[in-house]
Image (cartoon, rainbow, N blue to C red):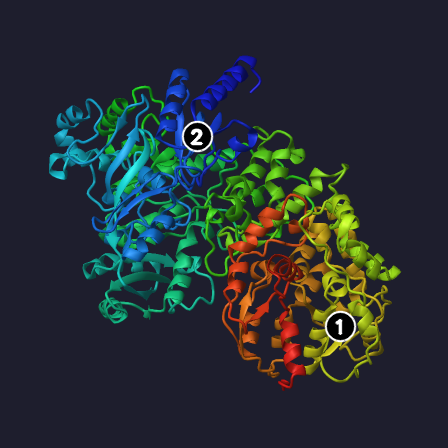
């Protein structure tokens, strides 16, 4: 905005709001950038954001904005798929303060909630009483009750418990003109004129609204009919923040079955599954969800087929729930079926369904797919025919999509590979949308069956309702909001469905970047577009082994979520709100608390990789500029540690950094948190120990090359020594990488004289580049990695596996190496050769039996192992060794350099307290504390005084104590 008068007006607005409200007022670039988008295809830039503390704040915001003609948009979790959670005026963010569960009455089965309360928090509070809130969208871990009421959300259990409107008793609403109303049944809380409007249009209200379970489109004015109780609260549900601002709600809870079973029914294709769904409703299931094979990952244990129905049943006992599921299996005409009663196994299957909103954003060939026609609904009995016609329409327009969703309610979700980047593609998007709207109406359906109309479909409502009913919607809106202040452009007098597309502001040409981004065609713009706003990263509590997003769980701030950072990167590329490009301080500050844990790489349904984006940003941000001290002290850690080893000054350095003024000075100069203790350096490196060993005979087993990573080499050589002991006990022949560039001789099968050179290598100089990458020193990282590839050529020619003990280093070699050097074929070969400790034993010593430890374990799976490497071999190795129990998820919070950097200590500690520290504190006395990562072990020692051990150390000790494997 360049006009001085407009700038002054915005400044005056911000000042007036700060005087009027107790909550936060944000008109800075970061605050605005974070809410330009929801989970839709649309983008609107607000003037500012207010986080109200109470209904008084809401009323004050409305008064200030009404006086200035500034629109107001209410926003919850920002997971709306039709664009209704974005706006050009002031956005009300209810997720900071108005998040309370004010009352829960088990006797009346009701709860009083504020609009920012996340659904899962209500479910957790209701569960001890055997109750739950019926609707449960797949975003239940981050969607808010206010957003659910605004959209009239449903979820997978709607066949049993209906929509959100079915669960609302009474609302507290502030109108645009400041009136406080309590909508409810019997005309309670109706604005002036609403009853008269309804009573003069009774015939239209009785005949103009399709009768189907998932009619979400338009205003629910038929709820005002006398035979429906003249329920003003119900008619308010689904109004998308256009009628009033919700400040409180009384909601109804339902009894939660004591036991559940899941019948997985297999069909030849999705049409067969769709046609079968309606026939299962008389059995009163809790869910009838459908999805086809192209959304299901391989190896998840579903019965054979091309499509499946997930039919959940409930009962007072497990036997009763199972009996109901088996009854459905017998009645269903299926290809195959499976009944799952184990709760953990059910969660694994449901996770596939819940993640579909993200996984569906990529076609099998990697092509992008988008919402826009995410949730049309037709009568369930007509779903099979509708799906066939829908597929034909896709084909006619040259489009692809994968339908899935609430088959029992006739509601289909789908992401379609629209080209929303070019004028021709946007034109096809419009033509398809118009024809699909007509197809839905021809099948007696609703344009929206769950997520609301927003901007995506409101323009097409006349095709569903006709012009006169849409005019009735406009009259109702005028009674509630005569100044059109609330979320204008939604539902009535809507914006065009192809305006405000969020992709239109991105650069037309690819951005020059350092990483290869192979999954995005080398295009950083496409990488940033991956974030569609599903917001799984905003889940406040970790579930199972999940890692993402530890910094959000520590701070609760949107800018410290994966989605928030992706939004800022999007706005950086757009250049309208964030105007400094790679030099942006807004993006830098948001990325500062990113731990580079890589959790989003695996846990984000669309595979956003914020650790890579952070490294890329830092690379550009500091190009030609002075870097923070921590980038030098910790980013170049391998150099300093090699220097200490070469000069044999480790004992002196340990003495100087143990405490006192010298330690404080070192931390201050190095940009290290004063709360941290500096790790002790090993006085004898791992390779120093290796040189003193008697060489192993070259014909004594399969050759494996043990990678002497920086942490094992200089900080915890005991891990390397233990790994050698175990690998050799398993019959493997261990070598270290070469230290000098090789000649042209081939290593062949690992038994030639060149292989002997490997076995007698003296000094380790290979490096995975991790510390350079995490600090964005990518030019230096590439230099280090090229040198490493030169050194590793004999190993690559021999085809020897490379065993890497430090998970973060293994992950860097597995993924960062080929992505930084995509044009060097050796990078892919070394990446493929990398094995974790457990992988090496499983693949290369499959007949070896580990020693019997026979103790419980606690600790944490390393975040990089979870995200990049996988831990299935580790689980199997622990089981074989008699190590029982599960490791926690999350991130330890130290995360390499992150937890050591000045200003990060409190967040680092909060991340550790999320899962790791509670799990080890609660562990019985005899428990083995496992922590394969040096950072994890350091965090345990410094925050809890607990010694964690690498799995190799545990097995080596067992071997020494006489439990030798065979």
Among the two numbered marks 2 and 1 on one chain, the one whose residue lies closer to the N terminus: 2
Q: Is residue 861 above or below residue 34?
A: below
Residue 761: x percent and y percent? 83, 71
Asked if 12 appears above or below 346 in the picture, the reply is above
Residue hosting label 2? 91
In-front residue for pair 858/922: 922
For residue 525, the mark is none
Quarter of the figure with residue 710: bottom right
Q: Which residue, given by chain and number where applicable, does mark 1 sit on?
A: 798
Q: Position of residue 609 (x, y in %)?
A: 58, 50
User: Quick one: quadrant of the C terminus?
Assistant: bottom right
Q: Is residue 400 above or below residue 726?
A: above
Point out residue 434 in the picture as x, y percentages from the top left corner.
35, 36
Whether residue 439 is visible to the viewer of this picture, yes or no, is yes
* Residue nearer the viewer, 63 or 107: 107
Which quadrant: the N terminus?
A: top right
Q: Taking 114 as reference, is 471 left or right? A: left
Circle nearer the viewer, 2 or 1: 2
- How many badges with numbers are in the image? 2
Q: Which picture quadrant has residue 320?
A: bottom left
* Residue 266 in picture, x, y percent from top left: 33, 66
Pointer 2 local density, CA inside 10 Å: few below 14, some 14–19, many at least 20: many
């Amino acid at each position: 905005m360049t006009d001085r008068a407009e700038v002054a007006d915005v400044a005056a607005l911000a000042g007036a709001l700060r005087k009027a409200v107790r909550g936060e007022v944000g008109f800075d670039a970061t605050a605005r950038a974070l809410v330009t988008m929801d989970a839709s295809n649309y983008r609107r830039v607000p003037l500012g954001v207010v986080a109200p503390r109470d209904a008084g704040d809401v009323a004050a915001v409305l008064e200030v904005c009404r006086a200035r003609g500034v629109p107001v948009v209410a926003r919850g979790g920002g997971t709306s798929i039709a664009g209704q959670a974005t706006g050009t005026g002031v956005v009300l963010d209810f997720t900071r303060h108005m998040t309370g569960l004010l009352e829960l009455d088990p006797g009346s089965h009701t709860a009083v909630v504020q609009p920012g309360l996340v659904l899962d928090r209500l479910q957790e509070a209701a569960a001890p009483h055997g109750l739950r809130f019926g609707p449960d969208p797949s975003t239940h871990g981050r969607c808010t009750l206010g957003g659910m009421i605004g959209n009239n959300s449903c979820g997978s259990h709607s066949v049993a418990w209906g929509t959100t409107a079915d669960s609302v008793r009474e609302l507290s609403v502030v109108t645009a003109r400041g009136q406080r109303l309590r909508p409810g049944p019997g005309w309670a809380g109706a604005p002036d004129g609403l009853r008269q409007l309804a009573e003069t249009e009774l015939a239209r209200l009785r005949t103009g609204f399709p009768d189907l379970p998932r009619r979400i489109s338009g205003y629910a004015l038929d709820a005002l009919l006398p035979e429906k109780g003249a329920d003003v609260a119900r008619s308010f549900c689904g109004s998308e923040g256009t009628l009033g601002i919700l400040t409180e709600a009384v909601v109804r809870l339902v009894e939660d079955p004591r036991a559940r079973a899941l019948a997985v029914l297999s069909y030849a294709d999705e049409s067969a599954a769709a046609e079968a769904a309606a026939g299962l409703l008389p059995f009163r299931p809790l869910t009838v969800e459908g999805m086809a094979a192209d959304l299901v990952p391989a190896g998840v244990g579903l019965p054979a087929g091309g499509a499946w129905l997930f039919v959940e049943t409930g009962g007072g006992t497990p036997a009763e729930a199972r009996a109901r599921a088996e009854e459905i299996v017998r009645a269903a005409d299926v290809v195959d079926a499976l009944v799952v009663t184990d709760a953990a196994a059910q969660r694994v299957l449901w996770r596939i369904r819940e993640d579909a909103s993200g996984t569906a954003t990529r076609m099998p060939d990697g092509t992008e797919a988008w919402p826009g026609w995410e949730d049309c609904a037709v009568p369930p009995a007509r779903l099979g025919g509708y799906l066939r016609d829908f597929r034909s329409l896709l084909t006619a327009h040259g489009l692809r999509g994968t339908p899935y969703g609430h088959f029992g309610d006739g509601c289909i979700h789908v992401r379609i590979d629209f080209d929303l980047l070019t004028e021709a593609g946007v034109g096809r998007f419009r033509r398809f949308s118009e024809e699909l709207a007509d197809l839905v109406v021809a099948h007696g359906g609703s344009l929206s069956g769950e997520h609301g109309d927003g901007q995506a479909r409101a323009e097409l409502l006349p095709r569903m309702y006709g012009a006169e009913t849409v005019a009735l919607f406009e009259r109702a809106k005028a009674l509630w909001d005569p100044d059109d202040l609330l979320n204008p452009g939604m539902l009535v007098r809507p914006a065009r469905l192809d305006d405000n597309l969020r992709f239109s502001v991105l650069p037309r040409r690819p951005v020059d970047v350092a990483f290869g981004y192979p999954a995005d065609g080398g295009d950083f713009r496409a990488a940033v577009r991956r974030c569609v706003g599903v917001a799984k990263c905003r889940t406040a509590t970790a579930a199972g082994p999940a890692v993402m997003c530890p910094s959000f769980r520590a701070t609760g701030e949107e800018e410290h979520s994966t989605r928030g950072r992706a939004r800022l990167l999007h706005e950086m590329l757009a250049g309208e709100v964030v105007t400094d490009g790679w030099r942006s301080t807004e993006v830098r500050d948001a990325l500062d608390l990113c731990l580079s844990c890589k959790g989003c790489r695996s846990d984000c349904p669309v595979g956003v990789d914020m650790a890579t984006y952070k490294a890329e940003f830092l690379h550009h941000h500091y190009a030609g500029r002075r870097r923070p001290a921590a980038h030098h002290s910790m980013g170049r850690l391998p150099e300093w540690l090699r220097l200490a080893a070469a000069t044999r000054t480790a004992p002196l350095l340990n003495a100087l950094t143990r405490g006192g003024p010298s330690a404080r000075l070192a931390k201050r100069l190095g940009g290290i948190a004063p709360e941290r203790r500096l790790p002790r350096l090993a006085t004898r490196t791992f390779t120093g120990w290796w040189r003193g060993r008697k060489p192993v005979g070259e014909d004594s087993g399969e050759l494996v090359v043990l990678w002497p990573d920086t942490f094992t080499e200089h900080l915890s050589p005991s891990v390397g020594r233990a790994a050698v002991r175990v690998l050799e006990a398993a019959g493997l022949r261990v070598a270290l990488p070469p230290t000098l560039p090789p000649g042209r001789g081939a290593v062949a099968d690992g038994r030639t004289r060149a292989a002997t050179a490997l076995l007698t290598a003296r000094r380790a100089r290979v490096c995975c580049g991790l510390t350079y990458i995490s600090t964005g020193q990518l030019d230096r990282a590439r230099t280090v990695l090229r040198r490493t590839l030169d050194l590793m050529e004999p190993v690559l020619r021999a085809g020897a596996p490379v065993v890497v003990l430090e998970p973060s280093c293994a992950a860097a070699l597995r993924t960062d190496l080929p992505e930084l050097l995509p044009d060097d074929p050796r990078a892919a070969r070394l990446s493929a050769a990398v094995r974790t400790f457990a992988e090496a034993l499983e693949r290369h010593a499959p007949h070896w039996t580990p020693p019997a430890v026979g103790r419980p374990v606690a600790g944490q799976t390393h975040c990089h192992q979870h995200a990049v490497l996988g831990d299935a071999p580790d689980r199997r190795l622990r089981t074989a060794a008699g190590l029982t129990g599960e490791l926690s998820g999350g991130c330890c919070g130290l995360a390499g350099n992150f937890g050591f950097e000045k200003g990060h200590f409190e967040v680092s500690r909060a991340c550790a307290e999320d899962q790791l520290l509670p799990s080890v504190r609660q562990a019985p006395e005899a428990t083995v504390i496992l922590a394969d990562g040096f950072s994890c072990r350091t965090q345990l020692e410094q925050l809890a005084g607990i010694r964690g051990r690498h799995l190799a150390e545990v097995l080596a000790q067992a071997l020494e104590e006489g439990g030798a494997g065979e």
